[in-house]
Image: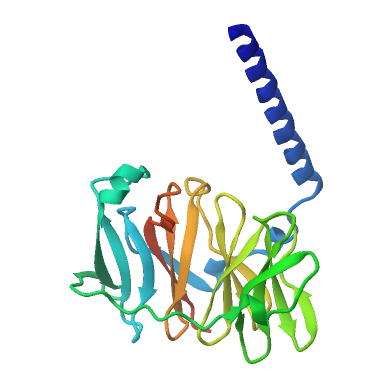
């Protein structure tokens, strides 16, 4: 029986290696054409980390845009075990990000949500299921999930009765935010270590938030714009740390440069 288990394990490993090689060969034969269009967001914006404890969640801007509110987990070290996280307390903080001052909040800050277009108001599609979208003065941008592959999503643009596909290729793209001035569309791109990508709706250029070699396997989450659309914040985690369904990590700030 033990010999059978060893043989079975070897066969499984060989199959896994073969599958990995096939995927690698397929990627080499079919390069990621969409990712090849991504420019570095530092061309149009400045990027800096605001927190470094890997314990923060749900960042968003105050109504006047002067502060960033967020939740911090009060745990001794980052952990992904349910036992530790279920006992972790949460406290609300804010950052005066222009002066680098941290404040502890007593109450729970309001987090107004942007208006979204619900799935029932989006066009029917044969092979994909519309999820939700955002409306601008010129178009509706929405994401849709492939009916055959649940994890796979694409982003579309609806102008009057014309449907235009924005993202394509073999990696999912999930819509996450639109700037209040309706200029920037933010989505997550990739399967495992997702990357934040900004689409400038004025120029139709894609800009990706860069990662260093050390950060290449890290996860980006939760982009949120300032009221004046000049900034957005997001979370970056060294591991896929979550409390329930909510990811936590460090908060980063993106500031668009003056034109």
Residue 173 seen in the current view:
yes
**Residue at (34%, 64%) from the top-left corner?**
50
The quarter holding residue 116 reads bottom right
Q: Nearer the viewer, residue 15 or 103?
A: 15
Q: Where is residue 185 in the image (x, y as percent from the top left)?
A: 59, 76
For the point 29% across and 45% down, the residue is 84
**Which of the two residues, 131 or 25, is positioned nearer the viewer here?**
131
Q: Position of residue 135 (x, y in %)?
A: 61, 85
Q: Which residue is drawn at 71% across and 78% down?
A: 157
Q: Nearer the viewer, residue 231 or 175?
A: 175
Q: 103 above or below 19?
A: below
The quarter of the displayed image where residue 248 is located: bottom left
Residue occupying the far bottom of the picture: 137
In the rendered structure, the answer to whether residue 258 lies left or right of residue 74 reads: right
What residue is at 46 percent from the left and 65 percent from the top?
A: 222
The correct choice, above or below, for 161 with respect to 70 in the image is below
Locate residue 227, reporting x and y percent. 42, 85
13 vs 128: above or below: above
Q: x and y percent of residue 243 in the render?
A: 37, 53
């Amino acid at each position: 029986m033990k010999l059978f288990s060893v043989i079975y394990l070897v066969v499984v490993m060989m199959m896994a290696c073969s599958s990995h090689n096939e995927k690698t060969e397929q990627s080499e034969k079919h390069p990621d054409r969409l990712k090849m269009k991504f420019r570095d967001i530092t061309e149009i914006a400045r990027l800096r980390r605001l927190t470094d404890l890997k314990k923060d969640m749900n960042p968003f801007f105050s109504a006047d845009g002067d502060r960033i509110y967020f939740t911090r987990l009060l745990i001794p070290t980052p952990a992904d075990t349910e036992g530790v996280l279920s006992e972790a307390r949460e406290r609300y903080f804010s950052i005066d990000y222009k002066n680098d001052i941290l404040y502890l909040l007593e109450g729970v800050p309001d987090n107004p949500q942007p208006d979204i277009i619900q799935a029932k108001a989006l066009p029917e599609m044969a092979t994909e299921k519309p999820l939700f979208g955002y409306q601008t003065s010129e178009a509706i941008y929405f994401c849709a999930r492939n009916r055959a592959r649940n994890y796979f999503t694409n982003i579309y643009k609806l102008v009057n009765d014309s449907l235009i596909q924005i993202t394509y290729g073999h990696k999912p793209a999930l819509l996450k935010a639109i700037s209040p001035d309706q200029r920037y569309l933010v989505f997550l791109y990739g399967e495992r270590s997702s990357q934040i990508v900004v689409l400038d709706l004025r120029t139709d250029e894609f800009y990706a938030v860069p990662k260093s070699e050390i950060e290449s396997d890290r996860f980006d989450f939760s982009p949120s714009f300032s009221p004046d659309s000049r900034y957005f914040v997001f979370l970056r985690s060294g591991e896929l740390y979550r409390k329930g369904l909510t990811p936590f990590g460090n908060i980063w700030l993106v500031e668009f440069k003056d034109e």
